[in-house]
Amino acid sequence: MGKPLTELTPEMVDILQGKTVVLLQAVEPESQTIYSTALSWVYAIDQQTIRYAIDHKSQFIRILEENPNIVLHFIGCESVFRVAGKAKLRAAKAEDVSINLALIEVKVEEVRDIIFFGGKITTDPAFIKTYDEKLIEKLDREVGQAIHRL
């Protein structure tokens, strides 16, 4: 844990290319509770911009319109990171994607290494998508292209 950064490092940008589990949290305005979900289609466009795809009916869209402050967490670079920023709906429905997804853009404001004292991640988390392999490839390609077209 050190001084907070104001942007992602190049290594973090490399990690956040749609193949990492990223946790998203925001404060639900009415109940003031933390709303959370796990994402996989998360792409760092550059050191100050992250975009992700989410179900177009997700409560996060309403939440972000009322309060754009969000936090993303991910594991990589031998640690755990918290990325705080402001989120904005960029597309209510992504074009040329087989399923209905909204595209959100986050402007990075702060990056913190939040691993516990003396901790080091030795193995990054791994996951698989459990639906049809051809559909996985198709959706990953479509979503990645839609996110980069914005």
Image: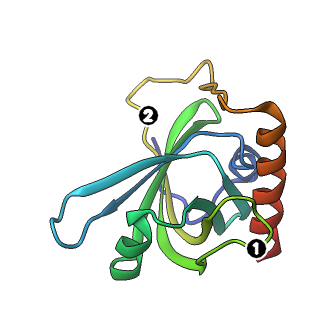
Amino acid at the residue labelled 2: Ile
Asked whether 136 or 85 is in front, the reply is 136
Residue 4 in picture, x, y percent from top left? 48, 56
Question: Which percent across, then down, holds residue 118?
Answer: 43, 23
Quarter occupied by residue 123 = top right
Furthest-top residue in this view: 122
- Total numbered labels placed on residues in the image: 2
Which tag is nearer the camera, tag 1 or tag 2? 1
What kind of element bears circle 2?
A: loop
The residue at the point 81 percent across, 58 percent down is 142
Q: Position of residue 103 (x, y in %)?
A: 62, 69
Within 10 Å of disc 2 (Cα), the crowding (few <14, some 14-19, many 20+) is some
> Residue placed at 36% from the left, 51% from the top?
36
Query: How many angstroms separate mark 1 from mark 2 (CA)?
Result: 38 Å
Indicate which disc residue 53 carries.
Answer: none
Q: Quadrant of the N terminus?
A: top left
How packed is label 1: few (under 14 Cα within 10 Å), some, or many (20 or more)? Answer: some
Residue at position x 38%, y 30% in the image: 116
The residue tagged 1 is 95
Rendered image coloring scheme: rainbow
Q: Is residue 9 above or below residue 15?
A: below
Q: Secondary structure at mark 1?
A: loop
| Rendered position, 118 above or below 40 | above
Confirm or deny contact between disc 1 and disc 2 (CB under 8 A).
Answer: no
Q: Quadrant of the C terminus?
A: bottom right
Q: Is residue 129 left or right of residue 2?
A: right
Of the numbered discs in the image, which one, if any, rests on residue 115? 2
Locate residue 75 relative to residue 117 in the image: left or right.
right
N-term mark: 1 or 2:
1
Q: Please name the residue shown 83% across and 42% down the image.
A: 137
Kindly identify the amino acid type of the residue bearing the numbered disc 1: Glu
